[in-house]
Amino acid sequence: MIDHLYRSFLDFPGQVVVVENAAPPPDVIERARVITFSGTGDRPGFFPGHANGRSGDGQHEPTW
């Protein structure tokens, strides 16, 4: 069922943001631009950290 959902996005003309812990099927990954947010590296999260070193709530440090 989830694989069919991912495949349906391939024909969508706009951008789709999927928040899911499972990877899309391999045939979707081959055809789509997939950006994985891993918690580290170049794209640690969907929202960027703050340049002043605070996330806004004073409890979390930025991940970059």
Image (spheres, rainbow, N blue to C red):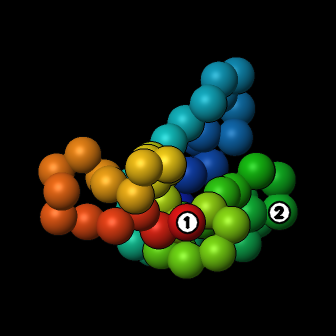
Q: Which residue is mark 1?
A: 64
Between disc 1 and disc 2, the foreground one is 1
Q: Quadrant of the N terminus?
A: bottom left
Q: Which residue is mark 2?
A: 30
Residue depicted at 49% across the width and 48% down the height: 51
How many callouts does the rendering have?
A: 2
- The residue lying toward the viewer, choosing from 58 and 17, is 58
For mark 2, give the secondary structure.
helix
Q: Residue furthest right?
A: 30
Q: Is residue 48 left or right of residue 31?
A: left
Q: Residue furthest top?
A: 13
Percent of width and height locating residue 48? 49, 49
Residue depicted at 64% across the width and 75% down the height: 41
Q: Is residue 16 left or right of residue 20?
A: right
Quick check: marks 1 and 2 in contact, CB under 8 Å?
no
Percent of width and height locating residue 21? 40, 72
Res 61 visible: yes
Snapshot quadrant of residue 25: bottom right
Q: Tell me how far mark 1 sits from mark 2, CA to CA.
A: 28 Å
Residue depicted at 34% across the width and 67% down the height: 61
Percent of width and height locating residue 33? 76, 50
- The residue lying toward the viewer, choosing from 48 and 34, is 48
Q: Amino acid at mark 2?
A: Glu
Vertical arrangement, residue 11 with respect to residue 48, above or below: above
Vertical arrangement, residue 12 with respect to residue 46, above or below: above
